[in-house]
Image: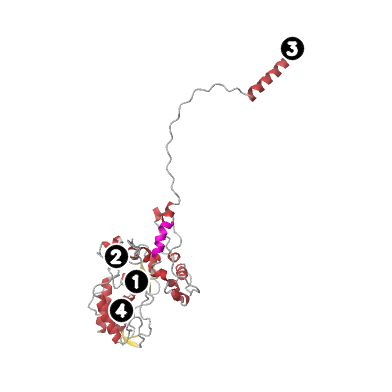
Amino acid sequence: MKNLKLIGFMMMLASSFLFINCTSDPIEGPAGISGIDGLDGIDGLDGLDSTADCRSCHSNEHRDPIKEAFALSVHAAGATVGYAGTRDSCTRCHSDEGYVNFITGKTAVAIANPTAISCNTCHDSHRSFDFETDGNDFALRNIEPVALDQTDADYVIDYGDFSNNCISCHQPRSKAPIDVDNDGLYLQANSRFYPHYGGQSTMLEGIQGAIIAGGSTVYPEVGSAAHRKGASCVTCHMGTSADGLSGSHTYEPSFSAPICATCHDTVPTEVAGLAADMAALHGKLLELGLISEDGSTLVQTETIPFKTAQALWNYKTVEEDHSHGVHNPKYAKALIKNALEAVE
């Protein structure tokens, strides 16, 4: 019996050595039969380049021509930036820092070392990066309709495009004379008796000139000018340019802008007959001692006839618009023709 147990034990021990040998040092057998290839999968969609939209504007290729154009502009010249360093009310439009303060709701104060208008003045951050849904706002600081803050806060101008940013500065800073004197006289005691140089938006709108009663020329309906209804600041002043000397950020009107060619054979530079009427009115105002020879300085007086004050206001309104009536031809002609009749 003991011998049988010993033989069994020896067999088990031998088997364990064989098991260890088989598992630790296997001998590779012949390759099996190849399986059938699976079906090709469907190609995935190409992903979007996350920076493609950004690069279309934020690349040197796109920005360099804009910088070159802007360098030719009056805005970049900064000829009047000095006003922002001495007058609180001038900072908002005569300096980069002042405009940023204004548009962000800060109090207007003189800037110690003001700098000229730059890219940063009008552009800041995008409101949305979903241009397909929300449109490209070009990171403009203002695209909303603008209330005329210093002359008529109840009147809002909305060009319906990016021109709203222009209205923030290109509006008057004072109002036309109002007859409050029972004797029909007006106290004119300010050598700056005229709308500010930037009254282009109200001229285009056809408002804030002095409406002289009894004039023979009819004043057109407010907002009826062709340039007001069918164009805007950016469409005329920032269009494409063939030579780089107009349009884009030079802000000079460009006939290359498609909208101009729909009505004009060439870029209009003045309204026919307006210059002659302006010269005649200037002569009358000069005779009355209300304006200087070059028209740049108004002579202070005490009281003048109310209609004469209106005529003076309208002369300076059309002059300071600097479009020679082009912004609103019918309105400009009515202002000057009726003013000329009033002083004659």
Q: Nearer the viewer, mark 3 or mark 4?
A: 4
Q: CA distance from mark 1 to mark 2?
A: 15 Å
For the residue pair 336 and 322, the one nearer the viewer reads as: 322
Q: Element at badge 1?
A: helix
First of labels 3, 4 by sequence position:
3
Picture disc at residue 200: 1
Q: Nearer the viewer, mark 1 or mark 2?
A: 1
Q: Is residue 34 above or below residue 186?
A: above
Query: Label 3 sits on what residue type?
Result: Leu
Identify residue for label 4.
315
Q: Position of residue 2 (x, y in %)?
A: 77, 12
Identify residue for label 3.
4
Query: Label 4 sits on what residue type?
Result: Tyr
- Report the magenta residues as a range: 57-69
Picture disc at residue 229: 2
Q: Element at badge 4?
A: helix
First of labels 1, 2 by sequence position:
1
Quarter of the picture holding the C terminus: bottom left
Q: CA distance from mark 3 to mark 2?
A: 118 Å
> Could you tell me if residue 143 is visible in this image?
no
